[in-house]
Amino acid sequence: MIGVWVMSASESQLERMQILVPAEQKQRMRVHAKKLGISVSELYRRSADAFAVDESEEEIHHAALEALVEALEVGTKRAAKAVDRVEREVAATLDFYEARKQTRAARDQSGETTPAS
């Protein structure tokens, strides 16, 4: 049996597009299209339309800038925490060496001998 497909006026303005999809996705789309009673092509068109953005270009740029600002704020907070941690580590190291220096100075004043270091 030969199937006949008649294009409607809107379908005549369609353009061919070839895409590559994994075999599993192709099969899922066939099953899903069959359940909906539409062609796989129509299912892909509807899927693409679901992602269409109706926002103006300015709104898109604004949203992108907000996302960048948020990312910068998160990065800045992480960097500030890292700097605070490093400052604490440096202060602890300086305190350690200062205490060591004072211990050696006290030994030198008392005449104690210190092991070579």
Image: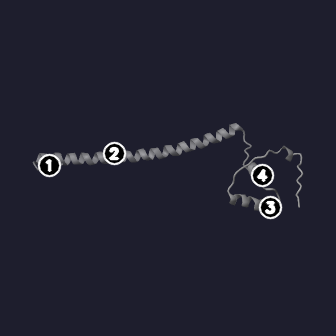
Q: Earlier in the sequence, mark 2 or mark 1?
A: 2
Which of the 4 quarters of the picture holds residue 60? top right
Looking at the figure, which quarter contains the N terminus?
A: bottom right
Question: Which mark is drawn over residue 98?
Answer: none
Which of the 4 quarters of the picture holds residue 94? top left
Q: Is residue 110 left or right of residue 29?
A: left
CB contact under 8 Å: marks 2 and 3: no
- Looking at the rendered structure, the kind of residue marked 1 is Arg
Q: CA distance from mark 1 to mark 4?
A: 84 Å
User: Crowding at label 3, few (<14), some or many (≥20) Cα neighbours within 10 Å?
Assistant: few
User: Crowding at label 1, few (<14), some or many (≥20) Cα neighbours within 10 Å?
Assistant: few
Q: Nearer the viewer, residue 8 or 6?
A: 6
Q: Residue at x 63, y 41 (%)?
A: 64
Q: CA distance from mark 2 to mark 1?
A: 26 Å
Q: Earlier in the sequence, mark 2 or mark 4?
A: 4
Q: Secondary structure at mark 4?
A: helix
CB contact under 8 Å: marks 2 and 1: no
Q: CA distance from mark 2 to mark 3?
A: 67 Å
Q: Residue at x 35, y 48 (%)?
A: 89
Q: Secondary structure at mark 2?
A: helix
User: Crowding at label 2, few (<14), some or many (≥20) Cα neighbours within 10 Å?
Assistant: few
Question: Which mark is drawn over residue 46?
Answer: 4
User: Residue 42 placed where, x, y %?
Assistant: 80, 53
Q: Is residue 102 left or right of residue 76?
A: left
Q: Earlier in the sequence, mark 3 or mark 4?
A: 3
Q: CA distance from mark 3 to mark 4?
A: 14 Å
Q: Earlier in the sequence, mark 2 or mark 3?
A: 3
Q: Secondary structure at mark 3?
A: helix
Q: CA distance from mark 2 to mark 4?
A: 59 Å
- Looking at the rendered structure, the kind of residue marked 3 is Lys
Q: Which residue is mark 1?
A: 107
